[in-house]
Image: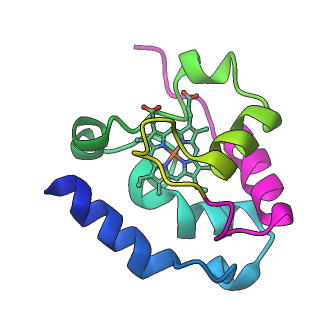
Amino acid sequence: MRRSLALLFLVATTGCDKNIAGGSTDGAAVFAAACAACHGPGGAPSAAMAAALGVRDLTSSAFKVRATPALVMAQVRNGSSNHKMPSFAEALTEPQIAAVANYVLTLPAAPPR
Ligand code: HEC
């Protein structure tokens, strides 16, 4: 149920018209519009999202050490293999995908736990 609500929310807020964030190539704006609902505004998902969908923490050191623009761009284009993260290939332009990938890499790391 939680998962379908999240997906409904996503469809309602993003659509497939390459008009997310008004087509902006500001990575922060694209992140806020397309990613923050699941990943959290700063890249760390809420406990509820982490539990419901297994959303990854983009501020964790485990992610930071292997994160590259190419990795994030591939994830955004293809979504996750378990389909819990959708593909954004139809929803975002290539410049938007590059911008949001670069933005993800600038998210401050979470304090060590
Ligand atoms: C519907 C919720 C949802 C949205 C929206 C979403 N993601 Fe995700 N994301 C996930 C989930 C769930 C995973 C973990 C998938 C898995 O288990 O393989 C994930 C994984 C990732 C990963 C892989 C992290 C790793 O450990 O390799 C990256 C990078 C990522 N997301 C970036 C983004 C970006 C950038 C956006 C916006 C363009 C975005 N996500 C939008 C749910 C979402």
Find residue 105 and report its horizontal and vertical position in percent.
Answer: 72, 38
Q: Left or right: where does residue 27 sit relative to residue 42?
A: right
Q: Residue at x 51, y 49 (%)?
A: 42
Magenta residues span: 88-113
Find residue 23 and report its horizontal and vertical position in percent.
Answer: 74, 81
Q: Give the quarter of the figure containing the N terminus.
A: bottom left
Q: Left or right: where does residue 28 sit relative to residue 95?
A: left
Question: Residue 26 appears in which quarter of the rendering?
Answer: bottom right
Q: Residue at x 52, y 76 (%)?
A: 14
Q: What is the total number of numbered labels drawn onto the structure image?
A: 0
Front position in the image: 100 or 44: 100
Q: Residue at x 61, y 60 (%)?
A: 31
Front position in the image: 3 or 45: 3
Question: Residue 100 appears in which quarter of the rendering?
Answer: bottom right
Q: Give the quarter of the figure containing the C terminus.
A: top left
Please say if 17 is above or below 3. Answer: below
Please say if 113 is above or below 41. Answer: above
Please say if 105 is above or below 9. Answer: above
Task: State the residue lying farthest toward the right.
Answer: 95
Q: Left or right: where does residue 2 sit relative to residue 91?
A: left
Find residue 87 and report its horizontal and vertical position in percent.
Answer: 58, 55
